[in-house]
Image: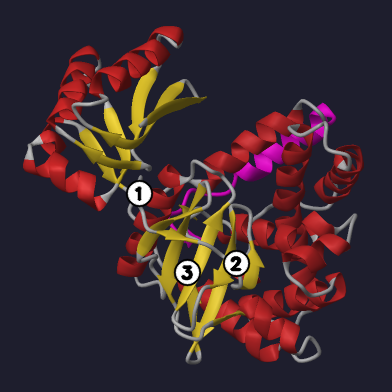
Amino acid sequence: MDVTYRIDKNILYIAVEGRVDASNAAAAEEAIYDIKRNNPNKHTVLDADDLEYISSAGLRILLRLRKDEPKLALINVSREVFSILEMTGFTDMLTVERAYPKMNVEGCKFIAKGANGAVYRYDNETILKVYFNKDALPEIKQERENARRAFILGVNTAIPCGIVRVGEGYGTVTELLSAESITQLICKDPENIDVPVRYYVDMLRSIHSINVDEGELPDMREIALGWADFVSAHIPKEQGDKLRALIEAVPKQNTLLHGDYHTNNVMVQSGEPLLIDMDTLCIGHPVFELGSVFNAFLGYSELDHSNMIEFFGYTYETAEKVWNAALKLYLGTDDEVVCQSVKEKAMVIGYTRMLRRALRRPNEADSPAKIARCKQMLEYLLGRVDTLLFD
């Protein structure tokens, strides 16, 4: 038996390893209380990831701990230990979370990387998304709930079917038989993008055809107003005032938006597009979605085109072709004047978001150049754009 601990976000995680029975229960309890005394005023969570067995003597420790801390929780509980806790009624008294199956990505084919994690082909039937955040359980559970909600609303989406442990972090498993991402289709033949762009736009139109009940998802208009308020302190007042006025003039609407829509997040299975990565679902006018799309294809890699290769696997020039073709298809027109007008509206949102991000990360090596570029482009765009609305 061994007892260790770690502290994260004012939570005291105490890990008990091995077997806790009559022979060592007293020592285990003493070690746990020593850790608690040396780390006062912290919520305690017992991590049972390596706990093999607990006897009645160990259960009495849990009773005493619960008396001191009514919201005591146990996490990563194995099937064997859970059976003991369930049989003795402890699952009714405590918050008990079962351990998740363990998987690894060694030897798995890398598919794509997003803002929150990397996606791998685990086998022919499943893909595995590994989250960068080691404590991603809340966002994973929210993403699963969003996926179920989107599916019920009519979006053709792949719902994660299980949560797993991957190293020290977490991942989700999704059943996608032989599916390929739009990114993979483009990389196969970057000179012929018509088919993958059609899949991409069909899915986007499907998303934007759905209205969501008010209050169910975050409002992108309110989020964008927050961006504008933040960056307004760093640009001339006249520009800041106009930026906020443009966003305020966008009417509230309950149109479903993905929030992070790019070619890594759309899979194709048997000729049918499927949406993945649902943690950013929101509502609002499509201009907010297009601002995010512009950033994904061009904005984030504008000053360093190698970012595009790292993120998508295809070149910046190909990304520009995809962006232009997708926008024309989405708008249903080849009119360059119309397309350029909508591009500029989307770019106002895109550069506002990028400027906020760069200002909040001043220590990153490329932040000064990004800040200067975003300010330059916002000055240009705000001199040309008088409304963010389009038909």
Of the residues shown, which amino acid type is indicated by label 3? Ile
Q: Where is residue 207 in the image (x, y as percent from the top left)?
A: 47, 69
Magenta run includes residue 341: no
CB within 8 Å, label 1 to label 3: no
Check the picture and name the quadrant holding the N terminus. top left
Looking at the image, the residue that sits furthest to the left is 88
Of the two numbered discs 1 and 3 on the same chain, state the one appearing first in sequence.
3
Of the two numbered discs 2 and 3 on the same chain, state the one appearing first in sequence.
2
C-alpha distance separating marks 2 and 3: 34 Å
Identify residue for label 2.
Answer: 106
Q: Nearer the viewer, mark 2 or mark 3?
A: 2
CB within 8 Å, label 2 to label 3: no
At 42% across and 22% down in the image, what residue appears?
12
Q: How crowded is mark 2: few (under 14 residues within 10 Å), some or many (20 or more)?
A: few
Camera-nearest residue between 114 and 208: 114
Q: For mark 2, give the secondary structure.
A: loop
Of the residues shown, which amino acid type is indicated by label 1? Glu
Instruction: Name above or below for residue 367 compared with residue 112.
Output: above
Instruction: Name above or below for residue 274 compared with residue 367.
Output: below
Looking at the image, the residue that sits furthest to the front is 23
User: Which portion, as a residue range, is magenta?
Assistant: 235-258
Dividing the picture into quarters, in which one does residue 368 lie?
Answer: top right
Compared across the picture, whether 27 is left or right of 284 comes to left
Identify residue for label 3.
Answer: 207
Of the residues shown, which amino acid type is indicated by label 2? Glu
Q: For mark 1, give the secondary structure.
A: loop
Dividing the picture into quarters, in which one does residue 330 lie?
Answer: bottom right
Camera-nearest residue between 260 and 376: 260
Check the picture and name the quadrant holding the C terminus. bottom right
Identify residue for label 1.
Answer: 216
